[in-house]
Amino acid sequence: MKKIELVTERLLLRGVEPEDQKMIFTGLSDPEVTEFYGVNFQTYEATAEQMKYYSDNEMAGTGKFWVVCEKNNGEVAGVGGVYNISHEHRKGEVGFWLFKNYWGKGYLQEGMNAIVDFSFKVLNLHRIEGVVETTNIRCKKAIENAGFLYEGTLKDAEIKNGKFISLCYYAIINPSESES
């Protein structure tokens, strides 16, 4: 996929570049940032795995990721994207993480709205899913505010840190294709 920027009222979302690895390590090595995120890294070198994940998804057409920046000053807030894209079923999954100083400011919802819009209009997806741990209250609120509908909870769906966790499933359907 070619490099595509998304612009919102307050944000610029730009493609992930190799030189972003240090920033991504800083975010994904912070236990508070990764408390509800699927991965975390203890070393800079290990973060190469995440960089490869971003790149591999883009090359295969199964994902697109952006570095989320403040539009007015270029400061990096985090990373968001759409992944697990199935072109056959015209669906994908949204994912997002932000540095702590950007929590509670509406950036997650604003960035997610831009990614969803891109996914519907450019990637021609029909459905976008969001999977949120039941205890991640902030993310559940943001995803609901972005127009996703709660579809149900899978009890004890995964093991994280040696304990079962339950996952809430959300989805949004392309409004130009939804049944009235």
Image (cartoon, rainbow, N blue to C red):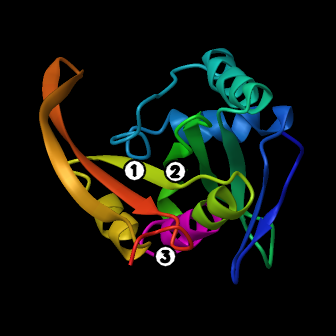
Residue at the (52%, 45%) spot, across then down: 91
Q: Pointer 1: residues within 10 angstroms few (<14), some, or many (20+)? A: many
Horizontal and vertical percent position of residue 56? 72, 23
Residue designated by label 1: 130
Quarter of the picture containing the C terminus is bottom left
Q: Nearer the viewer, residue 176 or 37?
A: 176
Horizontal and vertical percent position of residue 41? 52, 24
What is the spatial separation of the Cα atoms under label 3 and label 1, in whole angstroms? 17 Å
Residue at the (34%, 42%) spot, across then down: 36
**Residue 51 lies in the magenta stretch:** no
What is the spatial separation of the Cα atoms under label 3 and label 2, in whole angstroms? 13 Å
> Based on the displayed image, in which of its 4 quarters is residue 154 positioned?
top left
Residue designated by label 2: 96
Q: Which range is magenta? A: 102-115
Is 2 left, or right, of 148 in this rendering? right
**Residue 110 lies in the magenta stretch:** yes
Horizontal and vertical percent position of residue 175? 51, 73
Farthest-out residue, bottom: 9
